[in-house]
Structures are given as C-alpha cells and as structure tokens.
Image (spheres, grey):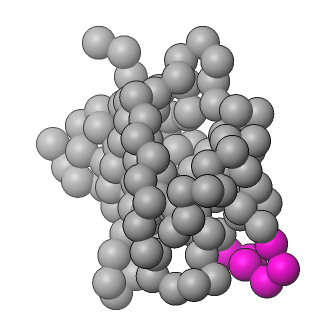
Amino acid sequence: MTIERFETGPRMSQAVAYGDMVYLAGQVAADTVGTGVTAQTQQVLEQIDRLLKAAGTDKSRILTATIYLPDIATFAEMNAAWDAWVDKQNPPARATVEARLAGPEYLVEIVIVAVRSAK
C-alpha cells in the first residue's frame, strides 16, 4: 500500500492516508483575529471537512476526535459548533482535553482519525 500525504509542507502534512485509514494533523483556526471559541471551532470543522473530502471520506466515517482547549471553561462554546456539525447518526468516539496550544491566539485544536470505506 502507498502512503498518501495531503497539503504537505516542510514540517508536516495536514492529512496522511494509508490503506483505508486517514489521520489528520491537529487543526486550528486560520483566522484568529477577533474570533471566539465557537467561531474558531466552526473554522476548524470546515478544514476537517475539506481534508476528509480530499482523502476520499467524510465526517460520517470519523472514528475518533481529540479536542484540545486551552481553557476547559469554554467546553460549551466549542460544543455549540461541534453539535451543529457532527453526524448525528455516526458520532465518533471523542475526548476533550485542557492543554496549552501552540500560541495564545488558538482557542481550539482538533485531531481526527477516519476511515475511507466500509469493509
């Protein structure tokens, strides 16, 4: 099997697929100026949709999601966007962790593992 890399840069790829498995790097908002947790989460979820599509899958095929928040008190704000987005028929296993992110401008980061086809 071939390893496929998507949106590859000098340090990392935004997504990597091997066989039917798809692994997304931690996704953060591209536009952080004046945005809150809900808006940043919406941006991140749009990026996830785009990367999953490029890899040949979609949010209904997500196996796990790990969500990092620098302030767990913003859990409900993140969930406002997540709950509107998640596939209600196929919700993934999920963990939410309080952790310092790469910069103070980032209010949420999401890591996804998905599968491409049913076997």
Percent across and percent down for residue 43 are: 71, 60
Query: Does residue 67 appear in this view?
Result: yes
Percent across and percent down for residue 49 are: 62, 45
Residue placed at 57% from the left, 43% from the top? 53
Horizontal side, residue 26 vs residue 35: left or right: left
Magenta-highlighted stretch: main secondary structure? loop
Q: Is residue 76 above or below residue 11?
A: above
Horizontal side, residue 25 vs residue 79: left or right: left
Percent across and percent down for residue 75 are: 61, 49
Query: Residue 37's quadrant in the figure?
Result: bottom right
The stretch of residues the image draws in magenta is 30-35
Percent across and percent down for residue 77 are: 73, 50
Query: Residue 15's quadrant in the figure?
Result: bottom left
Q: Quadrant of the N terminus?
A: top left
Residue placed at 34% from the left, 49% from the top? 23
Q: Is residue 23 above or below residue 64?
A: below
Residue placed at 52% from the left, 44% from the top? 52
Query: Residue 29's quadrant in the figure?
Result: bottom right
Q: How many marks?
A: 0
Is 31 colored magenta in this rendering?
Answer: yes
Horizontal side, residue 76 vs residue 113: left or right: right
Task: State the residue lying farthest toward the left.
Answer: 1
91 and 48: which one is in front? 91
Residue placed at 29% from the left, 12% from the top? 119
20 and 67: which one is in front? 67
115 and 89: which one is in front? 89
